Image (cartoon, rainbow, N blue to C red):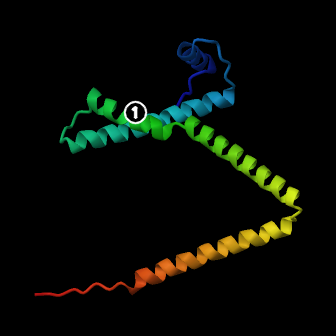
Amino acid sequence: MKIPNKGQLEQIMEEHTGRRTRISKDAASYMYLRYLIYMKELAKKADAIAFSQRKSLIGGDNIARAAPRLLTEFSDAQNIRLRAKRRSSEGANEEAKSKERSSRGESEESSEEEEKEARGSSKENQRRKVMKKGKKRIKVTFG
């Protein structure tokens, strides 16, 4: 299989974004691989839609139906942004907690003990839920 040269991919990116973008050779091969995987998944989903409609021909409506969902599943950009936001908010929360502890004069050991207690109580709650579910019995009668 021949991978398109990076000049072609740079032209595609320029047409899409409206500005010149440089692409490395490694990124070019990776982009093409992602494109092939996307096309394979799109063909599979469009075929499944056509099969569910009992058609042997994949039409534009089948592709139009499958493509948006597949694009959202396939897109990593939004997921990466969400992960970055979560990390930054977690970091901010940890910093705020450490500032509160230092203002109170508490050590890190006491915070670790509090975390262990919190974990223990959640385990106890899970055990209680399991026990409650286990007590329910269903009577089955045949007749």
Q: Residue furthest front?
A: 104
Q: Position of residue 31 (x, y in %)?
A: 58, 30
Query: How many discs appear?
Result: 1
Secondary structure at numbered mark 1: helix
**Mark 1 nearby-residue class (10 Å; few <14, some 14–19, many ≥20):** few
Q: List x then y, in percent, for residue 86.
A: 65, 46
Residue at the left extreme of this rendering: 143
Q: What x and y, as percent, mark residue 101?
A: 83, 59
What is the x, y in percent for residue 64? 33, 29
Query: Is 52 located above or below residue 104 in the figure?
Result: above
Residue located 65% across and 17% down the image = 21
Query: From the viewer's perspective, is residue 76 above or below residue 107?
Result: above
53 vs 4, nearest the viewer = 53
**Which part of the image, by quadrant, shows the C terminus?**
bottom left
**Residue nearest the observer in this picture, 15 or 9:** 15
User: In which quadrant of the rendered view does residue 15 lie?
Assistant: top right
Asked whether, in this view, residue 102 is left or right of residue 86, the answer is right
Report the residue at 51% width, 81% height from top: 128
Where residue 117 sits, quadrant-wise, is: bottom right
Residue at the (79%, 66%) spot, across then down: 111
Task: Please give the residue where the numbered disc 1 appears in the rendered image.
Answer: 68
- The correct choice, above or below, for 102 with respect to 43 in the image is below
Query: What residue is shown at x 50% (from left), y 32% (from top)?
Result: 35
**In the displayed structure image, the side of residue 130 where residue 138 appears, left or right:** left
Question: Relative to 96, does residue 135 appear above or below in the rendering?
Answer: below
Residue 82 lies in quadrant: top right
Circle 1: residue type: Pro
